[in-house]
Amino acid sequence: MIPAEKKRADANPTKAFFVRMITRDITLEDCIFDLVDNSIDGAWELSGGHPLSLDDKTNLSAYKISIRIEEDRFEISDNCGGITLDDAVEYAFTFGRKDKAETENFSIGVYGIGMKRAIFKLGTQIDIRSTYEIDENLESFRVPINVEAWLASGDENWDFDIEESEHLDQKGVKITVSDLTEAARRSFESPRFIKNLRRSIARDYALHLHRGLVIEVQGKPVSGWTIELRQGGDFSPMRAQFENVMDGERVFVEILAGMAAPPPNDSEPSEDFDDDQNTSGWYVICNGRIVLAADKTTVTGWGTEGWPQWHPQYTGFMGIIVFSSRRADLLPLTTTKRSVDETSAVYRQFRPKMRETTKEWISYTNTRKQIREEAIQREAAAKAVPIFEVAIRQEVELPRIIQKTKVPEANVLYTVPRQRLRSLASAFGNINMAYKDVGLKSFEYAFKDLVGDE
């Protein structure tokens, strides 16, 4: 007989396991972006919390996020309104979003683990301070976290202490992390990490930066990437807008696609071709944040049934699909916000539309080979315009090239003594003429002599 006290198996999680799991499959850069996302969510909420379409004129210039990285310290601060004490007690520090938690308007975060995952990935001594306004009064608190002490305190109590704090200089949040992890310390020592961080911020937050949001790294503002498509002459990018209702909530979708740059004249990449620096491909944006950039994989359809794998010949194509909803859980976000959930209902619904647009470009680059010089001239007439200025158009417009009737060809192969061939080349005026050219020239000579004009 099983004793009464042994009729239940312990299935409670351990802190150490949980920390390892939530930090295991995310990069240091993406952890920092989780903290940036939280700040942007605050700014967007203060700005009215509405769909972030390309037509939206919201001004975010009043808000600033500052990131300071040192060899032994990380700090991020903002003036985006702060975390209230009630939110800190009930929601902000829980591991995962509670079912009763109110969904933030058009937020980027959805799973409720971003801040905790980020600070655990960065270091073991954390100080989180918040200053906010309630009933026209300023209130402040701090949450000090000693990760090693918290882990050692047992698995029964997962709470963090909240303490009184002096006010910050402005309403917002300031997070300081010291006693950095080995991975963070090694990364922060490298100037390349800072450079890549700035570059990724410029790209992934391009829509927010376009609206005036200031993101500083090491005291210097990041300039947002200007996303452009080319139009003019025979080229017009598509821009279509859709609205769906899912689970009682509206989901807004916008698709843009077209030529971002002329395709290469040689379909085979040169030795210095770097696909990592190639901005062609599909971009997926969720509530303003680019979560997938320049994708050329099966995630956006390349190499799936009826759709060829990416080839350098298709370079120059850019497609952008923008999803926006009050409820971020309806969007195709992954936990790391660095890819797309391919099982998402809204993503599956619109991927066929992405396929149609991509096929237009593939067809153009195939037929373009027949009129390459003419195509180059046509492409030069198209000028780059920011995506915010692209007019609504349901389909992409590309030059219509009528395929030439292919004349049946025959290969001629024969062998002659080398000296005789060189003598013939010399008679044609060039002793170094390629063997192939000697054969073609001698054929043309014989044809004209024996047959005459075609």
Image (cartoon, rainbow, N blue to C red):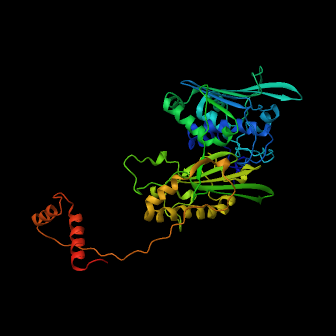
**Farthest residue in the top direction?**
166
Question: Relative to 201, is 413 on the left or the right?
Answer: left
Residue 93 makes an appearance in the image = yes
The location of residue 399, given as percent across then percent down, is 54, 63
- Seen from the viewer's position, the closer of residues 281 and 131 is 281
Question: Relative to 370, is 198 on the left or the right?
Answer: right
- Seen from the viewer's position, the closer of residues 47 and 45 is 47
Residue 310 makes an appearance in the image = no
Residue at the image position 39 percent from the left and 56 percent from the top: 268
Tally of numbered discs? 0
* 17 is higher (above) or lower (below) than 262: above
* 229 is higher (above) or lower (below) than 126: below
- Quarter of the image containing the C terminus? bottom left
**Farthest residue in the bottom direction?**
451
- Seen from the viewer's position, the closer of residues 188 and 20 is 188
The location of residue 96, given as percent across then percent down, is 71, 43
Residue at the image position 23 percent from the left and 72 percent from the top: 443
